[in-house]
Amino acid sequence: MVEEEEAALIERIAALERAKSAAAAAQARATALLDEKRRAAEAAAGVPANKRARGLASEVALARRDYPNKGGRHLGFARALVYEMPHTLAALECGALSEWRATLIVRESACLSVGDRRVLDEELCANLSALDGMGDRRIEAEAKRIAYRLDPQAVVDRAAKAASERTVTCRPAPDMMTYVTALLPVAAGVAVYAALKRSADTTVDGRSRGQVMADTLVERVTGCPADAAASVAVNLVMTDEALLAGDPEPAVVSGYGPVPAAVGRRLVAAAVTDKRSTATLRRLYRRPGSGALVAMESRSRYFPKGLAAFIDLRDQRCRTPYCDAPIRHHDHARPRRDGGPTSAANGLGECEACNYAKEAPGWDVTTGVDDSGTHTAEVTTPTGAVYRSTAPPLPGREPPDTGEETRAA
């Protein structure tokens, strides 16, 4: 009896996995149809071909509760499957492929002509039984092999172009750590790793190999010893009670997120006592009850710079819903050309992609302050869908409502 129940549960899990794949295929079809209708409507309205469907990727991302860059991938994935890769779409629809494995096939065929892409699609996915047991790496390797056989020059050209996409990213890791990731051309990446490895091979001081490599990376990038504060601004926001009176309320490191109060105090103590670094204190004022940032003491004569810092501290990340990208632009919700003021209320911290997306026709962003004093933003897309964003609260427990503003150091 128990075995029968477990077998039924396994079958249910498998059925749900097939349903997820089928739903992904249906999403792809709907996305491609939306793209087709939007382009047709804008063509009829006289919109130039190179400006049609601007901002559509961001709309798709919002509908899927995803970040904007991923919206572009969803849109490209849908176009490729529906118009160029019918066998891959069919395999996804019946559950022979997961959405991720279908994505790998689409990605590895992106450099090919439409004709060659269809050949790859047929060779790899026409026989559904051949896909049984193939994992991510094998699917990816097979798609690469076929692509290179069909058009080796296209694959080589794509590899050369990839060097222009080199970048460095930072994201939180567990236990007060961060992942700093560099996407580099293979020769440069191997050289960086080899240099760090060589430093570890010649250092014997009680640290582990990985610790030496990490410390060497920090020292060579910042120019400072790994145990010294770097000469760059790191905004740490915490309440005066947490800083001076041992209150356990977590602090916030701008660009990272919440950190334990004890860690915040340790960071402050290290910056204050280390003569190689400089620490400054700036008072922030939060609204009782909501924790909304309402004012900031400015130490700069140049108002726009102070206002930009205020928006950075208030918003912390891009204010578009579901987008956690770092702030790159300080934008007017109501555009300057329409009389929008340069103010904290009308200002939004946004990433580059979201700022440009809302410039497309049909987008509208409004800002305000709700009953709790929290800054809000509403994004309306060309289809009329509305998405709401609120600024995160500052650290601090909710005090008794006295009607007075409290301070966070």
Image (cartoon, rainbow, N blue to C red):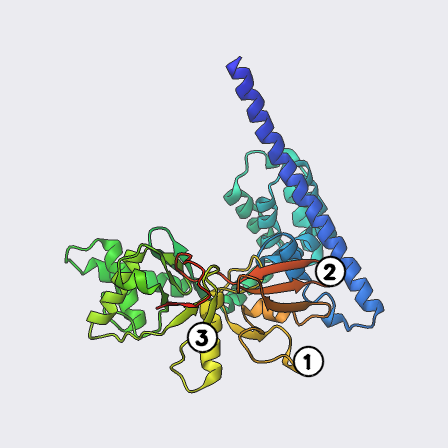
Q: Position of residue 355 (x, y in %)?
A: 59, 70
User: Would residue 218 be visible to someone looking at this image?
Assistant: yes
Could you tell me which residue is drawn at 55 percent across and 18 percent down?
A: 5
Mark number displayed over residue 309: 3
Residue at the farthest bottom position: 301
Q: Nearer the viewer, residue 123 or 325?
A: 325
**Secondary element type, mark 3:** helix
Q: Is residue 299 left or right of residue 1?
A: left
* Residues tagged 2 and 3 counted as in contact (Cβ below 8 A): no
Q: Are there few (<14), some (14-19), or many (20+) residues within 10 Å of tag 3? A: some
The quadrant where residue 13 appears: top right
Tag 1: amino acid: Asp
Could you tell me which residue is drawn at 72 percent across and 46 percent down?
A: 86
The quadrant where residue 67 appears: bottom right
Which quarter of the rendered picture does the C terminus lie within?
bottom left
Tag 2: amino acid: Gly
Q: Nearer the viewer, residue 213 or 261?
A: 261
Q: Position of residue 301 (x, y in %)?
A: 42, 87
Residue at the farthest right position: 44
Q: What distance separates the C-alpha of mark 2 from that of mark 3?
A: 32 Å
Mark number displayed over residue 384: 2
**Secondary element type, mark 1:** helix
Q: Is residue 366 left or right of residue 343?
A: right
**Where is mark 1, residue-wise?**
338
In the depicted structure, whether residue 333 falls above or below residue 124: below
Q: Is residue 384 left or right of residue 201?
A: right
